[in-house]
Image (cartoon, grey):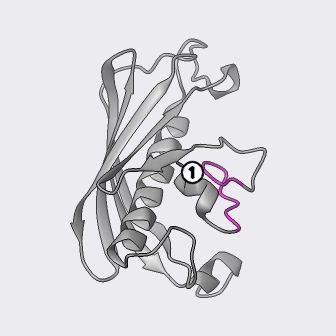
Amino acid sequence: MAAIQDQIKDNYCWGCGADNLDGLQLKSEWDGEGATATWTPDPVHAAGPRHLVNGGIIATVLDCHGVCTAIADAYGREGREIGTDPEIWFATASMSVEYLRPTPLGAPLVLRSSVVERDERRMSVDCVLEAEGKERARARVDAVQVPAAWKHGGGR
């Protein structure tokens, strides 16, 4: 199964864009109900203590995973393959992150998400980040659908 991010055209997001080779390259898989991703942070993603993941990096992967979940859900609700025309894009309208315990650096991080609320243009996605069998952080990502022109600077 191809990752959601690999099916989105011209995605240059630093966290999840397949087209941004300098980014985190997060890859989320959609199963029709929710999404799962596994990503392993490198030493450059450290917090002050070199054995823990920086909180901003944690927020980024939760954000990207949540928005990609919204995109995949929207395509699915229209009965279309991800990335088919007309393109469907979402952007983060708001996000809350709860850091539950330190996240170890170097351990694979497992992200799980599901849509918990939706209307015509907005979705709320709950995301969980786990490492070493423990929940490390949670997020609620509120995503809003934006026009495809948004990715090229339209609709600012």
The residue stretch that appears in magenta: 10-18
Q: Is residue 143 above or below residue 104?
A: below
Q: Nearer the viewer, residue 79 or 116?
A: 79
- In the rendered image, is residue 93 in sight? no
Query: Across the whole image, how many numbered discs are drawn on residues?
Result: 1
Residue at image location 42% in from the left, 30% down from the top: 110
> Looking at the picture, does residue 99 appear above or below residue 113?
above
| Residue type highlighted by circle 1 | Ala
Is residue 141 visible in the rendered image? The answer is yes
**Where does residue 29 sit, x and y in percent of width and height?**
47, 47
Q: Residue at x 30, y 27 (%)?
A: 100
- Up-down relation of residue 77 to residue 96 (above or below): below
Q: Is residue 130 left or right of residue 51?
A: left
The residue that label 1 is drawn on is: 2
Q: Position of residue 18 (x, y in %)?
A: 69, 53
Out of 22 and 69, give the one closest to the viewer: 69
